Image (cartoon, rainbow, N blue to C red):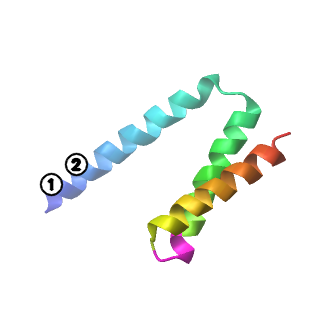
Amino acid sequence: MKTLSVTTRILTSLLVVSSLAACSGMTRQEKDTAIGAGAGAVGGAILTGGGALGTVGGAAVGGVIGHEVGK
């Protein structure tokens, strides 16, 4: 069980680092859209108890808000 936890932490860290590197070529508005979508997905998941529809809906709404705020 402990090995799985260590492996999960390592993979999560690699995913975060690679996703940050992928954002280097984005414009400010694209970054704001991505941040809004991520925050919306987390908010939607929290509000619906992890429901897929709430997570996707939150990501969509957050992405739109992030896109408009970035203008």
Q: Name the residue under label 2.
A: 7
**Magenta stretch containing residue 22, yes or no?**
no
Q: Name the residue under label 1.
A: 3
Report the span colored magenta: 45-49
Q: Are marks 2 and 1 in contact (CB under 8 Å)?
A: yes
Answer few, some or many: residues within 10 Å of disc 1's Cα (few below 14, many 20 plus, some between 14 and 19): few
Which residue is found at the position 81% from the left and 42% from the top?
A: 70
Q: Where is the C terminus found, in terms of image quarters?
A: top right
Instruction: Please state which amino acid type lies under the numbered disc 2.
Output: Thr
Q: Is residue 34 above or below residue 36?
A: above
Which residue is found at the position 45% from the left and 65% from the top?
A: 52
Along the viewing direction, whichever of 51 and 9 lies nearer the viewer? 51
Secondary structure state at the residue bearing disc 1:
helix
Which residue is found at the position 63% from the left and 22% from the top?
A: 25
Along the viewing direction, whichever of 10 and 68 lies nearer the viewer? 68
Q: Where is the N terminus found, in terms of image quarters?
A: bottom left
